[in-house]
Structure formats: C-alpha cells, structure tokens
Image (cartoon, rainbow, N blue to C red):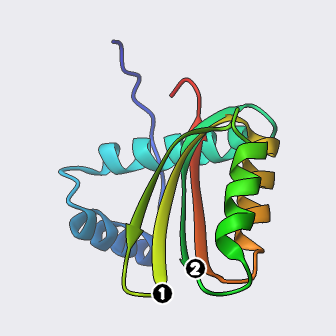
Amino acid sequence: MTVERVGVSFEPDLLKKFDEFIREKGYTNRSEAIRDLVREALIKREIEGNGDVIGTLTIVYNHDEGDVTNKLLHIQHHHNEEILSTTHIHIDEHMCLEVLIVKGKADRVRKLADNIKALKGVKHGGLIITKVPI
C-alpha cells in the first residue's frame, strides 16, 4: 500500500485538544488519528444515503408493558430479510436486552430500528451501522 503525505495546519488550542484526544484514545501518532477520523466521516456520509449497511440494533425493554413482546416478534418477522440474528438476555424479572444483527439497504434498516424503538415498553434503543463492504 502506498501512502501520500499531506500537511495539516491547526490553531494552537485545537492542536492541544487534538493531542489530548489522541492520548485518551491510545493513538501512537497524529496520522493514525486523522486517518480514523477521515474514514469515520466518509463512512457516515455513505450510510446517510441508501447504500448497503450492516450493524446492530440494541434495545432494552419491559416485556410486561404494552404487549411489546408480540409486537417485537411481528416487526421482526416483517423484516426477516434485514435481520440476520437476534440475541435475547433477561436482565431481571421484567426487563430484557435484545441485540439484532442487521444487514440491508440503509432506509429499511433505519425503518426497522425506528419502528422497534417507538414501541411502548422499549426503554432504550441504539442503531450502529456501517457500510458494506467495509
């Protein structure tokens, strides 16, 4: 792999904060950190459209509230093309954590996540996606 060198100028205060960020994250040099930040920005731009994505949807819900269990199953069956796998964990007598591994067109994956997060009984949900192929 070839590498091209580029110069970047920073104001002193911004550079100081960036160096603190680098130390906190464990980077060994500025170039690694800059490359990761650029990659992250480019991936974010690409997944804002409707390309192919892969990722996870994590939800925490109260299974006793609002018939949420049946509604979750209905939504998941309706999106069987986007859901590759699910993992379900009982947190306590009422609360559950579920992780869905998802893949598909970004708009369908986002719609799935929005539908699930909007259900009565779902206390928290988070979608993490990246482009395919990475």
Image quadrant where residue 4 sits: top left
Query: Where does the N terminus fall, quadrant-wise?
Result: top left
Could you tell me if the residues under marks 2 and 1 are in contact, i.e. CB atoms within 8 Å?
yes
Estimate the x, y position of residue 66 in percent, counting from the top left: 74, 84
Image quadrant where residue 114 sits: bottom right
Q: Is residue 1 above or below residue 87?
A: above
In the image, is 120 to the left or to the right of 5? right
Image quadrant where residue 120 sits: bottom right
SS under mark 1 = loop
Of the numbered discs 2 and 1, the one sitting upstream in the chain is 2
Asked whether the viewer can see residue 11, the reply is no
**Depth order, front residue of 90/100:** 90
Estimate the x, y position of residue 128 in percent, counting from the top left: 55, 54
Q: Which residue matches tag 2?
A: 63
How packed is label 1: few (under 14 Cα within 10 Å), some, or many (20 or more)? few
Estimate the x, y position of residue 95 in percent, counting from the top left: 47, 83
SS under mark 2 = loop
Which residue appears at 42% of the width and 45% of the height? Answer: 36
In the image, is 62 to the left or to the right of 70? left
The amino acid type of the residue labelled 2 equals His
Which residue appears at 69% of the width and 37% of the height? Answer: 80
Q: CA distance from mark 2 to mark 1?
A: 6 Å
**Depth order, front residue of 8/134:** 134
Which residue appears at 70% of the width and 71% of the height? Answer: 117
**Depth order, front residue of 114/78:** 78
Q: Which residue matches tag 1?
A: 94
Estimate the x, y position of residue 52 in percent, counting from the top left: 69, 30
Q: Which dot marks residue 64?
A: none
The amino acid type of the residue labelled 1 equals His
How packed is label 2: few (under 14 Cα within 10 Å), some, or many (20 or more)? many
Q: Is residue 52 above or below residue 112?
A: above
In the image, is 27 to the left or to the right of 42? left
